[in-house]
Amino acid sequence: MPEDFTKHTLVSPLDDIEAVRTIFDKHGSDVAGVIIEPVPANNGLLLQSKEFLEFLREITETYQSLLIFDEVISGFRVAAGGAVEHYGIAPDLCTYGKVIGGGLPVGAFGGRAEIMKMLAPGGPVYQAGTLSGNPLAMACGLGRLDCLEKNSLWKKLDRKTSEFVGTVTNAIGDTPAQAVSIGSIFWLSLQKNCPARAEDISPESTKKYADLFKKALDAGIYLAPSAYEVGFISSAHSRDELTTAAKELGKIVSSVCR
């Protein structure tokens, strides 16, 4: 990360209204934009309160700053319209990742018309890339989204994930651990209180996860090897497979968190 970028970047804790307010009180209209994963899922699944996200929308509008949602992970997973649809909060710009590519590398960004009009060839901001608008990737992406919509797969995946997490939670019982989910994304947090910030993740819980990973693998369940990685339920998972895995995972979580 170039130093020239970081020196112009202010970092605020997640889910902390007062911290963001302090930044705006001090820097006001000099804040060009606020960038956030509305569903932080690259360092655990750190679900943010809707109140916090609504506050970001309000304060950026007050100071005429941009609100940018990084939906590289949550976009087209949480819902057809991503976290934007889930929370009912419209940012000024959104970024999306390879989930839309049907298996091929593709990314996208979009936003309000007045902002997008600033891009070349209609505007002064140049944006291009070797694979920009690649016909194969675009066809796969459109085919994937069409399949999801026609087969109501978002609703089916939501239901599967809720059932899976519910079964894990029941199997965990009163063990100090959490199974968290949103859309088809889930995460196992091996501590009593489910964190909303990376700094709230207990180092002890990451050690427990290493044990969980090995025991789950021995039981035929392949989780991500890092405690900070989330999991995804897909249409390829059958209900029977998910129920069996969830019950076994609950037992393993209970054994490593005693």
Image (cartoon, rainbow, N blue to C red):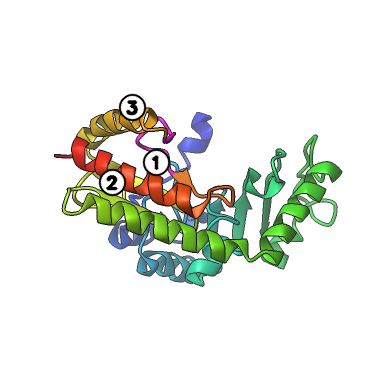
Magenta-drawn stretch, dominant element (helix, strand or loop): loop
The answer, for residue 118, to whether it is visible in the render is yes
Tell me how far mark 3 sits from mark 2, CA to CA: 14 Å
Q: Which mark is residue 214?
A: 3
Q: Is residue 100 magenta?
A: no
Amino acid type of disc 3? Lys
The span from disc 2 to disc 1 (Cα, nearest Å) is 22 Å
Q: Is residue 120 left or right of residue 203?
A: right
Amino acid type of the residue tagged 2 in the rendering:
Gly
The one nearer the camera, 82 or 187, is 187
The residue wearing badge 2 is 250
Q: Residues within 10 Å of mark 3 (few under 14, many from 20)?
A: some
Q: Position of residue 1 (x, y in %)?
A: 51, 30
> What are the residue bounds of the magenta stretch?
221-230
Q: Which quadrant of the structure image shows residue 137?
A: top right
Front position in the image: 31 or 242: 242
Q: Quadrant of residue 128?
A: top right
Find disc 1 in the rendering and name its residue.
43
Horizontal and vertical percent position of residue 190: 25, 42
